[in-house]
Image: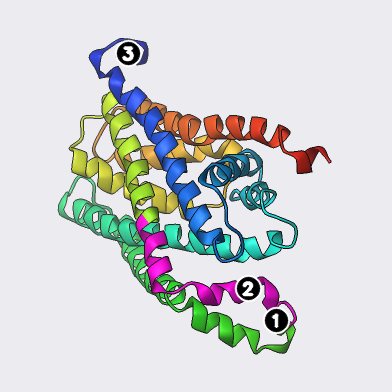
Amino acid sequence: MIVNTFKSEAQWRVYAACALMMLNWGLEAKKWQLLMRPIQSLTYRRAFRAVFSGQALALGTPNRVGEYVGRVVYMDDGNRLRALSLSAVGSVAQLLVTFFLGFLSMLYMYFLLDNNPYMSHPLSILWLKGLLVIIFFSTMLLFLFYYNLAWITKVFEKIPFIARFSYFIQKLETLHNRELNSIIILSLVRYSVYVIQYLLLYQFFGINVLWWQIICLTSVQLLIMTLVPSIALAEVGVRGKVSIALFSLLSANSLGIIATAASVWLINLIVPALAGSLMILGLRIVRK
C-alpha cells in the first residue's frame, strides 16, 4: 500500500514537504542572524551553515543541546559564550509559539473526547483538564519572561554571583519589543511550515481526516514532543507512539500514521544533520 502511494499522483506532496524543509531551516537561519546582530554581524549564508552544522551535533545529544555548540563555532573568538544566551531567546520564542498553539489545539481535543462517548474516558479527561491548566499558566509565564527580558537581565546582574558573568548576558538588554516581535513572527512562520509538512504527508499516506483536524492534532503532537525528553537520533520511536495515540482517535490507518512520523523525522532531522556534517568537516576551526 505504501509503495503504491509513492507511484500515485499525490507524490507531489512528498516533494513539497522536502522543499519546505529548506524553508524551515532557512527561517531558523534568519532568526539566528537577527539574534546574533547585537554581538556580531553574520551573513545569511554563514548563519545558514551554522544552523545545519548545529543539526549535525544535535543528533546524538539529549534534547538537541549539541545544536548550540555546532552554531557557535561560526562565531568569532570572544563571542561564542555570549551567543549562547542570545540563542536561548530564539528557543524561548519557538517554545512560546508551540505552547500557545498547542494549548488552543488541546482545547479542541478536550471537546472531541468529552463530546464523543466512544472516545471519552474519565481518567483521560481528568488528565487533559490538568494538562490544560498547566500549559495555560506555563504559556503565560513564558510570555511574561520573553517580553521582560531586558528588565529580568538587569535584576539578575545585581546578584553578586551572577554579576561576575554579566558580560555574557548583558546583550539581552538590547533586545526590545521590535526585535522580539520579529523573532516571534519568524518562529510562528516556521511552526506553520512544520505543520504544513505534517499535513501534506498525512494526506499522502492516506490519513482520511479533515485538514483542520490534522492541524490541531499535529499541534498537540508537537507540544507533547517538546515536553518529552528525547535524543533526536532515537526520536522516531517516540514520534510514532505519540502520533498513534493522537491520530488513532480519528483514523485506523496506523501504518500511514507511523510512516508520516518517520518521514518528517527523516526529512527535517536526518537530512539536515547529514548536510551539516559535511559543513563541519570543512570548518577551519574544527580542523585546527
Tell me which amino acid carries mark 1. Answer: Ile
- Residue 1 image label: 3
Q: Give the magenta range.
A: 164-185
Of circles 3 and 2, the one toward us is: 2
Q: Of callouts 1 and 2, which one flags the residue occurring earlier in the amino acid sequence?
A: 1
Q: Nearer the viewer, mark 3 or mark 1?
A: 1
Instruction: Look at the numbered discs 1 and 2 and tell me whether their residues touch, using CB distance below 8 Å.
Output: yes
Does 34 sit left or right of 110 as displayed?
A: right
Q: On the rendered image, what quadrant is the C terminus found in?
A: top right
- Where 48 falls versus 68 (above or below)? above
Whichever of callouts 3 and 2 sits on the residue coming sooner in the sequence is: 3
Q: Secondary structure at mark 2?
A: loop
Residue located 43% across and 57% down the image: 94
Q: Amino acid at mark 2?
A: Ile
**Nearer to us in this view, 271 or 72:** 72
Tag 3–tag 2 contact (CB < 8 Å): no
